[in-house]
Image (cartoon, helix red, strand yellow):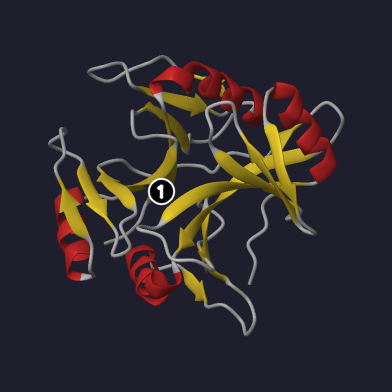
């Protein structure tokens, strides 16, 4: 398969969907598109330029992140992913293949193409920011299989964790909007989950902006800060420069 575009879906609970959707539109600077779908459960965060790569879904099982992988032939891609260890889940949409990775992470193959990566958002105070990374939070017993699976599915440049580190990485070309960070957790969990990471030229300024929009500060570390959005979604703001593609 050839991965044409990677897109992150923010699956938000019904009772906090409106607050969460408005929050993410505000902090990304991407306009919130109209509700669509059979139950009006989908919306797109539309950037000022380039192709969208962040979408919203009202979902009772939220909050969570799932990924949409744009490919030319979802059925063929699903069959290949099954050979790599994924499982197929029931799908209400004929053209969409809903999958679970070997570690139980939900993703979809969709028949859409790629496009131009949006530019980082420039804010009035001069700093820039960009949601540029999905971090897969992987239980230790599942880490090797999950890393192998996503490396094979994406075909992206692979960097395994260095000694003493819990972080590996799958890095695409500069045309893709998102990269994948693979975090090996300390404790076992039932399944792999994910969160979004921001790059920014000024972490403190970006944090202030998110807090003013309704986020809650969870914990700060040397290189990143953990926040929670009004819908209960946890995410991180990091010191990585917008547009970075680490080696």
Q: How crowded is mark 1: few (under 14 residues within 10 Å), some or many (20 or more)?
A: many
Query: Residue 228's x, y, as percent?
Result: 62, 36
**Residue for point 55% across, 46% down:** 196
Residue linked to disc 1: 5
Above or below — where is 91 with respect to 45? below
Q: How many marks?
A: 1
Question: Of residues 57 and 219, which is closer to you in this image?
Answer: 219
Determine the secondary structure under disc 1: strand
**Residue for point 83% across, 26% down:** 124
Query: Residue 112's x, y, as percent?
Result: 30, 40
Q: Which quadrant: the N terminus?
A: bottom left
Above or below — where is 50 with respect to 133? above
Query: Residue 2's x, y, as percent?
Result: 31, 60
Along the horizontal axis of the image, is 95 left or right of 204? left
Along the horizontal axis of the image, is 152 left or right of 12? left
Judge whether residue 177 can be spotted in this image.
Answer: no
């Amino acid at each position: 398969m050839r991965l044409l575009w990677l897109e992150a879906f923010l699956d938000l609970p019904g009772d906090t969907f409106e607050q969460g959707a408005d929050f993410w539109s505000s902090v990304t600077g991407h306009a919130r598109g109209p509700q669509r779908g059979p139950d009006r459960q989908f919306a797109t965060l539309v950037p000022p330029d380039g192709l969208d790569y962040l979408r919203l879904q009202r979902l009772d099982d939220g909050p969570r992140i799932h990924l949409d992988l744009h490919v030319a032939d979802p059925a063929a891609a699903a069959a290949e992913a099954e050979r790599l260890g994924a499982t197929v889940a029931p799908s209400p949409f004929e053209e969409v293949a809903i999958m679970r990775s070997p570690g139980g992470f939900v993703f979809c193959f969709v028949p859409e193409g790629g496009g131009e990566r949006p530019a980082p958002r420039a804010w009035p105070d001069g700093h820039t920011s960009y949601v540029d990374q999905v971090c897969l939070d992987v239980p230790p017993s599942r880490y090797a299989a999950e890393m192998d699976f996503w490396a094979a599915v994406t075909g992206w440049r692979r960097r395994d964790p260095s000694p003493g580190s819990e972080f590996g990485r799958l890095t695409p070309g500069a045309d893709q909007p998102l990269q994948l960070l693979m975090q090996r957790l300390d404790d076992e969990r039932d399944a792999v989950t994910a969160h979004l990471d921001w790059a920014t030229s000024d972490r403190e300024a970006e944090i202030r902006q998110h807090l003013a929009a309704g986020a809650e500060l969870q914990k700060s570390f040397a290189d990143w800060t953990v926040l929670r959005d009004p819908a209960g979604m946890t995410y991180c703001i990091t010191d990585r420069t917008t547009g970075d593609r680490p080696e």
